[in-house]
Image (spheres, rainbow, N blue to C red):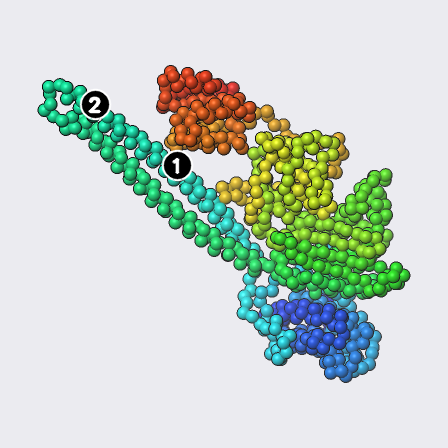
Amino acid sequence: MLAALAVESDPDQPLDVSELDIELVDIFVEEGGDLLDHSDGLLARLREATDDRDALIGLQRDLHTLKGGARMAGIMAVGELGHVMESLLEAVAEQRQALGRDGVPLLEQGFDRLHAMITRVGERQSIAMPEAMIAEFEARARGTTTLVATDAEPIATEAGAESSTVAASEPAQPLRPLSAPISEDVLGDDDEITARAPQEQVRIRADLLDRLVNYAGEVAIYRARLEQQLGAFRGAIAEMAQTNTRMRDQLRRLEIETEAQIVARYQREADSAEQAFDPLELDRFSTLQQLSRALSESANDQGSLQQTLDDLTRQYETLLLQQSRVSSELQEGLMRTRMVPIDSMLPRLRRVVRQASGELGKQVQLKLEGSQGELDRNVLERMTAPLEHMLRNAVAHGLEAPAERKQAGKSEEGSIRIAVRREGSEVVLVVGDDGRGLDRDAIRKRGVERGLVGENAVLADSELDMLILEPGFSTANEVSRLAGRGVGMDVVASEVHQLGGSLDIHSVPGKGVTFTLRLPQTLAVTQAVFVKVGETSFAVPIASVQGVGRVARDVLESESPSYEYGGEDYAVHDLGELIGHGPAKAEGHLQMPVLLIRSGDLRAAVCVDQVIGNREIVVKTVGPQVASVPGIFGATIMGDGRVVVILDVAPLVRRRNALPRDVAIEPPQVAETRRVPLVMVVDDSVTMRKVTGRVLERQGFEVATAKDGVDALERMAEMVPDLMLLDIEMPRMDGYELATQMKGEARLRDVPIVMITSRTGEKHRQRAMEIGVNRYLGKPYQEAELLRNVYELLGIEQKND
């Protein structure tokens, strides 16, 4: 078994596992990755202070554990290299040897080589014994020197990444919930071993965890639907209570009328000679009283039943509230299991910088700020490759060679900074360097050559900078291992936008360039602002919304309307026109509601009909056909089962800006009147509303209902019906009062009104006609007669059943 991995003449061959324990190898690969990531942090400390004894001892212990695990798993090449590196660190720690000026770069090269070897083992590829590197470390440990190790160890690279002889881009690190126990000889009494003590953990497949998160999201959707249905049930109980009150009032008046009739009859019969029986003893009076009493008891029973339903509803609301809390905690817990530390990708990024700077002969230091937060595993994995592209670009394009930096008055060692901070529900990644900045002259020249900009076009610096995000764009004159193919920043921009984030560029000539990436903390649940355009609702991720405002209508009539917010100008656009829905009108509002959208250098104030509010939503992916439509980020399911599209507004605005100013996006042709007429039924009787509503819905009409005049006016603040069916006797505001108010308001004056009432007398009919009611029908109405009047007033042809 020892010979199996001692020397490999052809490192491209698959790993010979015939004499290895596969389970033990997998455990070692996982533990080895953790140990090397930990060592990378210690290496960064050692680079800052080469006399950091704690860092030296920590590295020595990591290598000791790695060596022991490698030999136990039978990976002897890793064990041998780890052993000689440990020997050098031991000699330095005991002050028998000095680390030297190039000692830390040599250690970095050795750790990169260990990482490459372990990565290949995990991919079941063979590894070669790094003899030259082993000899270099042995010589350093003895106090002699030899040639710098140049062992070639090619490793697998991801698509589009460049290969390297020492270290290259490896696949994204998986979530590692299970870690093998650390060897006992690594654990000592020192305090710096606070953090690597083994914990009891379990291994969970990532796809299973993703499914569980999705199921938790489904539970949240069903809970919202239950809440909405329970609210409707609560509304029905309120209607029942009003009906009971009305019935008790009618019974009270019936009893008064009955008693009055009995007294009147008694007085008439008192004048006659027949006084054998008291009127109250006559059957006809006692029967009427018995029915009245029975109805009163039934009304009391119905009131008692209503109270019971009310109590049960209150209990259900309490249970649903408790279930909501548990469901939210479950969802948050599952989301936390998908969160991984941001600094878990830092060792990989450090290796990328070391590799790129080594190949180009540049001195580069990677500085990290605020990387202790957490990010969704899916977001982190999808952003790792784009971040690598940015770091390679910074080394290849941004940072100057040492001689050029010295001539410019800078230190010979370039600096790349990665800062991480949390802003609300977003994670902000700032990647910057202190290099030469973007060469805008070269960018403009290449943009003209590729036809991206006109030769005489006047562009702002920010507009020029954004050209580097175009696919295939590169200012390099020749193709190298790291740059020149035009693949890089367009991949970064595409990935950021697909994640629902934004990318901003800020460059200062001679000072450097800074990229600011804003990403959602999680992809499963997010906050969104809901808006309405026409009768359609849309959700806009709150990460891209700077605020909400209102713009005067006369501003929209100017040639280039804009809205000022926070000292910046936002170009005004119409969301309805951007999506081909027809312009937003915001009828009934003096000013137009606007969403203030910010994405990179884009500032847009987008007009809508209504801003409904913001809420937390569960993001659902849409199919490839829908996802390919520009501006669609995903979809969510509302409490009533409706599917609402989540819009990414920035691409819609950019597409509109790309068109010539005299070309408009043609909206679909919209009829002057509503395609499906809206009929409002206003009646205090639940039965009448339901029966009449069903009759109209069977004919294909859209139906809205109101329980009295006040309720109808509140509903008509948001909509104007095409026709109204109106009762007379209603609480709060009767039919006469409502009709009078509608005829006195310009917005509602032309709505035809059909009055349906049990008051069929000529006096009531005459008053209705004087107000302006169009038709007057008695209860109970004939369905055919009602439909005939509805179709006549709407001016459409009646359907033939």
Mark with earlier residue (1, 2): 1
Q: Quadrant of the N terminus?
A: bottom right
**Which quadrant holds the C terminus?**
top left
Residue at 70% in and 40% down: 564
Name the residue rendered at 28%, 39% in the picture.
301
Residue 799: percent from the left, percent from the top? Answer: 47, 22
- Residue 345 appears in the picture as rendered: no
In depth, the one of 119 and 549 nearer the eye is 549
Residue 428 x %, y %: 68, 55
Which of the 4 image quarters holds residue 654?
top right
From the image, tell me which residue sits under label 2: 264
Q: Is residue 512 above or below residue 189?
A: above
Q: Is residue 197 left or right of residue 694?
A: right
The numbered dot on residue 239 is: 1
The mark total stands at 2
Q: Amino acid at mark 1?
A: Glu
Give coordinates of residue 54: x percent, y percent: 69, 76
Relative placement, left or right, of 613 versus 156 is left
Q: Position of residue 516 (x, y in %)?
A: 72, 53
Name the residue at 73% across, 78% down: 89
**Secondary structure found at label 2:** helix
